[in-house]
Amino acid sequence: MPNPLLEVKGLKKYFDINGGVFGRKVGEVKAVDGVSFAVMEGEILGIVGESGCGKSTAGKSILRLMEPTEGEVRFEDRNITNLNPEEMRQLRRDMQIIFQDPYASLNPRHTVEKIINEPLLIHSELSSEQRKERVQELLEIVGLSAYHASRYPHQFSGGQRQRIGIARALANNPKLIICDEPVSALDVSVQSQILNLMEELRDEFNLTYVFIAHDLSVVKHISDRVGVMYLGRMVELTTKDKLYDEPKHPYTQALLSAVPSPDPDVPRDRVILKGDVPSPANPPAGCAFHTRCPQAMDICKQVRPQFEEIEDNHFVACHLYGDVQ
């Protein structure tokens, strides 16, 4: 079996909570709490979960846009968590990100040409004329026109801005792109255009995506495998067909039962979860989901379930499938 392009082991990102007169640390928010997965070259791994579960923080921690608290990130079998800033800078041409908000991620004072040109200026040895040609080529690749290069971000719609963000991410032919909810701010009709574009680019340039979203139908459309996160932890990971046809974890079952069906006559078993999501500053002991789980057992309140393979390529963190049962 080939080595994965990206391997994440026990990734944690905690934020300190300061309080009192002297601003001392009084606690911590466990935004990402021990996430592990691997992504093969050319694969699209979807990561889903409700808002605040740590998806975006995990994505940014993988790229070290936020420094991880603990854990290991291996890219092309190289541990990148302990690289110095200069080594990390050289690696960034192979690892890029498409940000969630197409309005905030583009500098309003720069023309589109300058925005897309910047990564070329930093990472490539192209001449000014070659960079100009490359910017025009990138704009056409993402479905815009070369004459758009002289315009400013405020002159574009949300979907066009996201295309500019994609062009910027593609500038240096990266191997891995973290897509942080790239279509959540867009209309449904524009979402499908952007998703189809991303799939075409994956095939054309052999890209690998980690696709973060909270829309299960979007993730089903684009992903090869899907991981489900809850309160900073990965609870299930498998191929998209297995996940959508046979979800194992009670949280995944509840999420999928909430997806609207286009056929109103199809009978559906809706799983309604009780209570609210616990605070990541004070997560429950044992399984983080036990406070809302309809199948919770006594052991769930005390012992944190291991994230382990229960079937071929199907990982679940749940005592229903562990050795305990």
Image (cartoon, grey):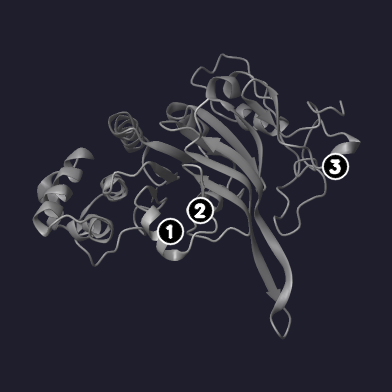
Between the C-alphas of marks 2 and 3, the distance is 31 Å
Determine which quarter of the picture holds residue 189: top left
Dot 2 amino acid type? Ile
Dot 3 amino acid type? Val
Q: Is residue 314 above or below residue 175?
A: above
- Which residue corresponds to the image point at 11% horizontal and 47% vertical from the top-left? 146
Of badges 1 and 3, the one in the foreground is: 1
Q: Which mark is residue 80?
A: 2
- Which residue corresponds to the image point at 68% horizontal and 60% vertical from the top-left? 29
For the C terminus, give its image quadrant: top right
Residue 266: image x %, image y %?
Answer: 58, 14
Q: Earlier in the sequence, mark 1 or mark 3?
A: 1
Q: Few, some or many C-alpha atoms within 10 Å of disc 1 (few <14, some 14-19, many ≥20)?
A: some
Between the C-alphas of marks 1 and 3, the distance is 38 Å
Q: Few, some or many C-alpha atoms within 10 Å of disc 3 (few <14, some 14-19, many ≥20)?
A: few
- Which residue corresponds to the image point at 54% horizontal and 59% vertical from the top-left? 82
Instruction: Left or right? Give the position of 101 relative to 254.
Output: left
Q: Which residue is mark 1?
A: 88
Q: Secondary structure at mark 1?
A: helix
Residue 289: image x %, image y %?
Answer: 75, 41
Of badges 2 and 3, the one in the foreground is: 2
Instruction: Left or right? Give the position of 257 relative to 81.
Output: right
Instruction: Left or right? Give the position of 249 relative to 130.
Output: right
Judge by depth and name the residue closer to the eye, 297 or 76. 76
Q: Which residue is mark 3?
A: 303
Between the C-alphas of marks 1 and 2, the distance is 7 Å
Q: Few, some or many C-alpha atoms within 10 Å of disc 2 (few <14, some 14-19, many ≥20)?
A: some
Q: Earlier in the sequence, mark 2 or mark 3?
A: 2
